[in-house]
Image: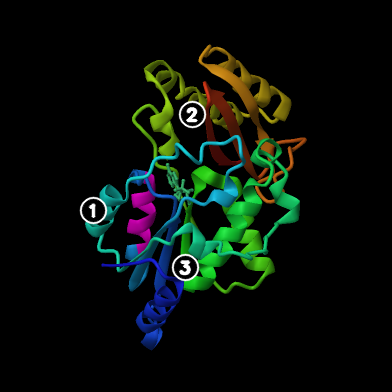
Amino acid sequence: MELIRIPRIVQDTCRKYLVKGRTLGFVPTMGALHDGHLSLIRRARMENDVTAVSIFVNPLQFSASEDLGRYPRNLDEDTRKIRNLDVDILFVPDENVMYPQGFATRVTVEALSGKLCGRFRPGHFEGVATVVAELLNIVSPTRAYFGQKDFQQSAIIRRMVKDLHFGVEIVVCPTIREHDGLAMSSRNSYMDEAQRQAASALYRCLTRAADAINAGERSPLRIKELMTAVLSSEPQIVQVDYASVYNPETLDEVKRIEGETLLAVAARLGDTRLIDNFIVNV
Ligand code: AMP
């Protein structure tokens, strides 16, 4: 595996790998790798001739009040995990390489960025779209892999790639969970024991909602009430940013549940903000 810090060298290396119609699978991450990330890397490895992973904690997607400073970083441990997965290229750029002096471009996916998490994290998805656009242009992968856990992020990237003709296939992979259903996340390590126990309420509220829908419930209001009831039974959950039923394409709340439907939740335990979602199809 080659660990590379300079975009031009990544570009040259990826081009070299891509001769003779070979395919390149790319997994962008912010590091602190867990089994969720590793599942994306395995999938990329399986579906492509060459695999590239990036690790970059992107300051542009954190607001001033968010957790950029304490976001977990462990490059040695991450490198060891990746090495075991037979990754060809590990791209670890510095901040001044991704955002050199004079950097002035922002990518905004207008219709989707202000909804769901966007309402509570202004500027977040602009930061995500901008860095992913840069990374995709540097690596030029055949396919790029994202997790369903960050559903809105994957919807925004799919839209951006389509609108701007990036010519990369976006693959969205299933959410990997802990034993009690909690979606794996680098941020789970922030929680104390009581918060960690309570955190499975996000998964439980989604399961309860999906069960009700599968049993015939079609009222979004009723589903929203069910989700809220599960979340509010946990005193460790100090705030529910949203818990509702959405159209997975437009990310608007739906008036009636039919076809592919997104159930999504964001809640805070102490100062840890967690998100999760299910897609149901009825
Ligand atoms: P992050 O390092 O949090 O930016 O995540 C990098 C990629 O891993 C994103 O595409 C995430 O959606 C994905 N990811 C994070 N957690 C999980 C999980 N529990 N299961 C599947 N994919 C995940």
Mark 1 or 3, nearer chain start: 1
State the residue position of label 1: 80
Q: CA distance from mark 1 to mark 2?
A: 30 Å
The nearer-to-camera label among 1 and 3 is 1
Residue displayed at 55% across by 37% down: 277
Residue 54 lies in what quarter of the image?
Answer: bottom left
Count of marks overlaid on the render: 3
Residue 23: give x, y in percent of width and height.
Answer: 40, 76
State the residue position of label 3: 143
Callout 1 secondary element? helix
Q: Is residue 80 left or right of residue 168?
A: left
Quadrant into which the N terminus falls:
bottom left
Numbered badge on residue 203: 2
Residue 30: give x, y in percent of width and height.
Answer: 44, 50
Numbered badge on residue 57: none
**Amino acid, disc 2:** Tyr
